[in-house]
Image: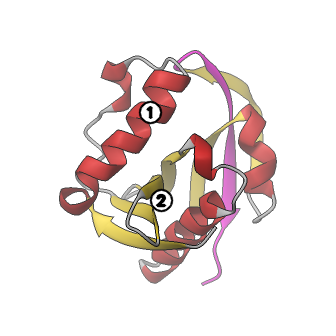
Amino acid sequence: MSATVLICPWSEARDRARAIRYAVFVEEQGVPVELEWDEWDEPSWHALALAADGTPLATGRLLPDGHIGRMAVLKPARGSGVGALVLEALMRKAEQLGYPELVLNAQTHAAPFYARVGFAQVGPEFEEAGIPHVEMRKRLAG
């Protein structure tokens, strides 16, 4: 699937990112809506993957402290590589900003996806919003 990934502030990403995250986290996974929106959206960089016609497909965010989070791909785009494009764009932005390391809390089933690009599990499995997760880290060149 061909997609363009934009890295933008929350003011530009808000409507499209919220729609993707609501569909994936709230509707599909049952995350309480009050846990989905937080104070970290505004100061973060957001990735938006868009189809050639401009349809939003996936999103993720890079927090000011080097955490990657809220990675979400809409069902029709899963398995197409668009999630990898979002992750790569967020990693490139982190490198541009000079972050020495990236950290994320991966849903356990998604840990192999992150491991393929060099993230390593740190510590035991834990629960977040009722979903099993593992902390993963990746050192960046620099």
Q: Where is residue 124 in the image (x, y as percent from the top left)?
A: 77, 29
Circle 1 residue: 23
Residue position for label 2? 66
Residue 65 visible in the current orientation: yes
Which residue is farthest front? 53
For residue 99, say whether it is visible: no
Q: Residues within 10 Å of mark 2 (few under 14, many from 20)?
A: many
Secondary structure of residue under mark 1: helix
Dot 1 or dot 2: first in sequence order is: 1
Given residues 80 and 135, the one toward you in this image is 80
Mark 1 in CB contact with mark 2 (< 8 angstroms): no
> In what element is the residue under mark 2?
loop
**10 Å neighbourhood of mark 1: few (<14), some, or many (≥20)?**
some
Give residue 31's mark: none
| 61 in the magenta segment | no
Distance between the Cα atoms at labels 1 and 2? Answer: 25 Å
Q: Magenta segment range?
A: 129-142
- Residue 136 in magenta? yes
